[in-house]
Amino acid sequence: MVTRKLICLRTAKVWQHQAGDQPTDWVPYPADSAAEALALCEREHPLVGLVLLDMAPNSAVFAEIESLLRRTGGDMVWVGLVTDLPTGPGPFQDLLVNYLFDFHTLPVDSHRLLTTLGHALGMARLRQAGGGAARLAAVEQGHLLGESPAMRQVFAQLAKLATVDSSVMLQGESGTGKELAARLIHQRSLRAKGPFVAVNCGAIPASLIQSELFGHEKGAFTGACRRQIGQIEAADGGTLFLDEIGDLPLDLQANLLRFLQERSIVRVGGTDTIAVDVRVITATHRDLQQEVTLGHFRQDLFFRLCVLDLTLPPLRQRRQDVALLAQHYLVSLAPRLNPRVQGFSDRAMQQMQAYPWPGNVRELVNRVERALVLSEGRLIGPQDLGLTAPPGDLRLPTLAEARARAERQAMQAALDGSGNRVELAAKRLGISRGTFYRMLDKYKDDD
Ligand SMILES: Nc1ncnc2c1ncn2[C@@H]1O[C@H](COP(=O)(O)OP(=O)(O)OP(=O)(O)O)[C@@H](O)[C@H]1O
């Protein structure tokens, strides 16, 4: 069966011995080293791995395996086999708690091992269905993600903008993805093999921006001890992205206009005219037409820059994308920040859907990052995100909700207190392993 591939890292013999005497539909892929296992993971895309952890925590093998589990933890679920339980806190216990779905001590009861692997597969499939890499790949456009009607329209327009060489002005609130959109246009254009140079006009002091854009000759001003190529020249053959174009001082607007008309520059302190072949994409979160009316922005430059334009919609107008973006950033950031986290609780997701996102996608990325750092459970809860709860949330919980919350907390505490060992956690709570798994399943989406 395609989905029942099992990476057996250092466990080929154990697997043969334990599972060899009974039929299973797992297809084992034996690997002796982490490097071998990684190559298999990249080639076979398995959902579950079994790893023998019998090495010293300070050994090179331990470090290699930890790195493998971290790298593959976003797509796969790992089960461990250990010779001894850790005696206390330390790297070995951290490895078990952070990267493993479950673990068994040797010798293993093959029936129980197969049950655990079945649960691990179920968990991996759940994670995949909730926004796994395959689904993301389908909707990913460059690095700009979205599946809302508004973003589908943006993608269609971007595709058209990429086929021509005219100037483009990208509009939209801060954090809506204007720079990503500019990169996408470049990557899809005939200039893709040339450089993409991004300059934030709002971040460079007015005194430096002329030489930053146009470059300077040696001795052009105090401190100009050598010739410096400017960003326009650096983008020759490619695309120049001028972010926050509305912040460009008026005198420089005249210079930029001259460049756009003549397609050549003169470095500061120089006399030579240098031809430059560049496509210019600009971005602004200001209403530039109003800036033109107010006399803050040259009308002739505005027309030169805004041959084509595209507006990136704010996140609050495309709530359909919230879950997709949140899952994407969770999957990509969790291996580095908190590999234990496997998703968002239902309530966290509801809060994210309801939140107005004034900082747009940039704020969402920051919130997910913060939540990953703060989260102590396997699911990110509303408290980890730090979003203000919508008013409806202030109602008293029903008895059933309060009971469910108490059960979830007891299970989490039992798991934490037993090094994530389900069997031990169940024993501590006075319930069977089967009941524990059933409850885990029942609460898997709650915080
Ligand atoms: N549609 C999207 N898909 C994935 N990531 C996104 C998307 N939009 C924005 N981001 C992420 O949000 C952050 C901000 O994006 P970006 O810098 O492109 O926004 P911007 O509109 O140019 O912001 P500003 O106007 O403040 O410069 C980046 O981390 C970017 O990767």
Image (cartoon, rainbow, N blue to C red):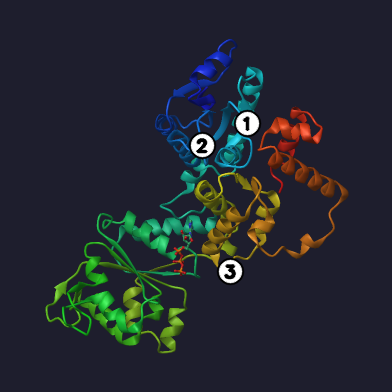
The residue at which mark 1 appears reads as 85
- Name the element at disc 3: loop
Q: Quadrant of residue 408?
A: top right
The image quadrant of residue 251 is bottom left
Percent across and percent down for residue 41 are: 45, 32
Give the farthest residue toward the right: 399
Q: Residue furthest top?
A: 21
**Distance from mark 3 CB to nearest ligand 1 atom below 8 Å:** no
At horizontal 25% and vertical 78% (from top left) the residue drawn is 211
Q: Nearer the viewer, mark 3 or mark 1?
A: 1
Name the residue: 51% across, 22% down. Answer: 11
- For the residue marked with disc 1, what is the amino acid? Leu
Kindly report which numbered mark, 2 or 3, lies closer to the viewer in this rendering. 2
Which one is earlier in the sequence, the residue at label 2 or at label 3?
2
Residue for badge 2: 57
Residue at position x 63%, y 52% from top? 375
